[in-house]
Every structure is written in structure tokens, then in C-alpha cells.
Amino acid sequence: MSDTSMDFNSRYYLIESVQQIVETIGVDCVLTGLDLLNVSIDNDSHFLTANLSKGKVICNSTLIEFPDNMSLPLDLSNLDIEGKIILSVSFKYLRTSRPNLATISLKFLNYSYICSEWFEERDKIVLAIFSYNKALKTVTTTQSTYLDKQTIYINNKEYEIRPFNYTIQQLRPLLKSFADAIT
């Protein structure tokens, strides 16, 4: 598994009134960014590398910001000659004073759509699915768009790929006004 952990100071807990507004937007969704910039397989080392833009998500009722662009490498040498990789956001809210990091990670998904590294209580947002072929040095990407919702089954549960929230564009001016009013 390959992952990028988020800085502890980048996580924000939301007060109850803001939380109620957030829940109308979506519980586990991408707010901005986290766009896939590119994905490739290195010809010599069999590393798959996914590059993502910075962005914000709501995951497990927590606003999380990834403040920098990210590069996530995954060594494919011990994996099947072809297969699928999940690009996901993982976070579970815990009431603790210890660091509680969110991660963006790459995880192998077998042909039966089972992922031994997938934990339903933490893994909430699927950003993309990559289908790779090491012999041909190819990788294709499956993502959702506003008009073309894609889903995938992982460990016998259906997940929306890149769960865009369709109302966020309409609500953004209202949320900005609200945020300005409470600061």
C-alpha cells in the first residue's frame, strides 16, 4: 500500500450548526480539487505513480484539507501481471488528542473485487480505479463525472467512484457567506 498522510493541523472539526449544513452537501464527498493530474507505469521498475492536485473533502463528517499536490507511487512487482488499483481517501473520526491522520492511498483490488487492505469504517471515498497491465505498460482510469456516475463493488459493497456532490456548485456562495459571517 502507498499513502500520503495529512498534517494534523489540516483537519478541522465543525461546530454543530455548520455540521448540519455540511450534511446537506454530503457526508463523504470531494469538495474541491483532488483531481488526477496523471498516472503512469515506469517501464523499468514496474512502479505505478498517481499524481493528484491539492483539495478538500468531507470524510466521516470532518472537513479535511490536503494542502499540497501529491505523488503516490505503488510497487507493482509483487502484484498480478494485470489488475485493478483503488485510489482512495481513508479517515475515521476518533475523539482523541493524539494525531488522527487522513490518508490518500493506492490499494490492490483482486479479480473477485476483494481488497484485503480495505476497511469500511475508514475507507470512505474512492477517487479513481486504475486498471493496469505490466506486460503492456498500460494503465487506464475510471472516474465519475457530473453526468456519468460510476460505481464499483469492493468487498461486496457498492461505492461511487469520486463521489461528487451535485449541489455543491449551487450552495458554494451560501456556504461562503455563512463562513464569512462566523469568522
Image (cartoon, rainbow, N blue to C red):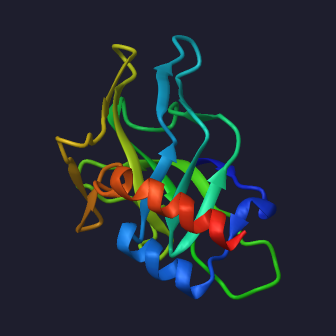
76 relative to 67 in the view: left or right: left
Count of all numbered marks drawn on residues in the image: 0
View extreme (left): residue:
148
Q: Is residue 90 visible?
A: no
Quarter of the picture containing the C terminus is: bottom right
| Residue 145 location (% of width, % of height) | 26, 40
Q: Is residue 176 visible?
A: yes
Q: Answer with the quarter of the image where residue 93 lies.
A: bottom right
Against 65, is 178 above or below? below
150 relative to 72 in the view: left or right: left
In this view of the protein, which residue sits in the foreground, 82 or 8? Answer: 8
Q: Which residue is drawn at the image coordinates 51% and 11% (left, top)?
A: 43
In this view of the protein, which residue sits in the foreground, 165 or 106? Answer: 165
In this view of the protein, which residue sits in the foreground, 180 or 65? Answer: 180
Against 171, is 104 above or below? above
126 relative to 71 in the view: left or right: left
Q: Which residue is drawn at the image coordinates 28% and 54% (left, top)?
A: 166
Against 166, is 40 above or below? above
Against 10, is 3 above or below? above
Q: Which residue is drawn at the image coordinates 41% and 76% (left, top)?
A: 23
Q: Which residue is drawn at the image coordinates 57% and 50% (left, top)?
A: 104
| Residue 110 location (% of width, % of height) | 32, 49
| Residue 84 location (% of width, % of height) | 34, 40
| Residue 130 location (% of width, % of height) | 36, 35
In this view of the protein, which residue sits in the foreground, 164 or 124? Answer: 164
